[in-house]
Image (cartoon, rainbow, N blue to C red):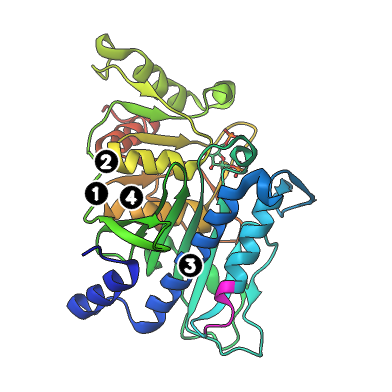
Amino acid sequence: MATSLSRYLVEQQRAKQNIPPELRLLLEVVARACKSISHAVNKGALGGVLGTATTENIQGEVQKKLDIIANEVLIEANEWGGHLAAMASEEMDSIYVVPNRYPQGEYLLLFDPLDGSSNIDVNVSIGTIFSVLRKPETSEKVSESDFLQPGHAQVAAGYCVYGPQTTLVLTVGDGVAMFTLDREQGSFVLTQENIRIPEDTREFAINMSNMRHWDKPVADYIAECLAGKTGPRGKDYNMRWVASMVADVHRMLIGGGIYLYPAESDKPEGKLRLLYEANPLTFVVEQAGGKASTGTTRILDVEARKLHQRVPLIIGSRLDVEQAEASIQGRAS
Ligand code: AFP
């Protein structure tokens, strides 16, 4: 019999005591919200959800209607269950504290409700990324500083890709499991456990049109990949760039590869957000045997100083990330 997400979580808790009931509720609610977002994405033009809203988010990016819808779905689904103290999102300037009319729980939830917004209207894979932290015991009244924890403090993380299939990928710090949405049953069904990323691959993902903004070590590393079999890396690489990190990272989770969004001269801090993009994807990738780095520091050890902090990101197959790090740090690889 197929294993549903609920059954998987219950059985994990029974065997390993690693998913207390509040965390299980939280993960089930996030999955339910992803199901609703998946339905909205699927309806597309028929649901009137495509196109741009009139608002901008904190990063000055014009919001798509679906960015706002996905954000609202996640907030509404999660605010009343008693499992959360507060939430933070790419689409909200500051944190959303659970209203007084509901009980407050011990967890904090961060999310990018819809990663890859530029792909919404053109029917290319997009996704939701989420990270779960425990509210620090020292804090009585929840505040933004409670969210500023290093990535290694995450208790759970994952993402949902809305592509040809809707796929939920999850870690609670004990390996990575993947669930596929069965639309007829209306539930996520376990389709792969103990996912491992191939250690060494021939595929990279980077936005080549930004080449003129890269630091020399990054440019040199990519030039070596492009040099192919007769170059220093001794193999022919393939390149992909979906422009939805969640889809690019999912591709490498299954087939291996390396994704880079480095610091660039016009984006010295990088483009991606530490707390709700880089950290959760890194938690998943590390749990699958991969690696993620700024080029000099493990992503999960980066100090979080502000909610919407950006970070340069190199993530994927272990050996490839180590080679990119070595190039950037001027070590022979
Ligand atoms: P949007 O969600 O604003 O489209 O950004 C997506 C993203 O953060 C990441 O998912 C992509 O890999 C990357 O940005 C694409 O960046 P470019 O637009 O520079 O290619």
- The quarter of the image that holds ligand 1 is top right
For the residues bearing labels 3 and 4, Cβ distance under 8 angstroms? no
Rounded to the nearest whole Å, what is the CA distance between mark 2 and mark 4?
9 Å
Q: Position of residue 261 (x, y in %)?
A: 50, 37
Is 97 located above or below residue 273 in the figure? below
Q: Quadrant of residue 36?
A: bottom right
| Residue 240 shown in magenta | no
| Residue, disc 4 | 285
Secondary structure of the residue carrying tag 3 is helix
| Residue topped by disc 2 | 318
Q: Quadrant of the N terminus?
A: bottom left
Q: Position of residue 99 (x, y in %)?
A: 66, 84
Magenta range is 77-81
Asked whether the beta carbons under mark 2 and mark 1 sit within 8 Å of each other, the answer is yes
Using a 10 Å C-alpha cutoff, classify the residue at mark 3 as few (fewer than 14 neighbours), some (14 to 19) or many (20 or more).
Answer: some
What residue did someone put label 1 on? Answer: 289
Residue identified by numbered label 3: 32
Measured in 3D between alpha carbons, the distance from the residue under mark 4 to the one under mark 1, in whole angstroms, is 6 Å
Can the viewer see residue 149? Answer: no
Question: Which callout, 2 or 3, points to the residue nearer the camera?
Answer: 3
Work out whether residue 306 can be spotted.
yes
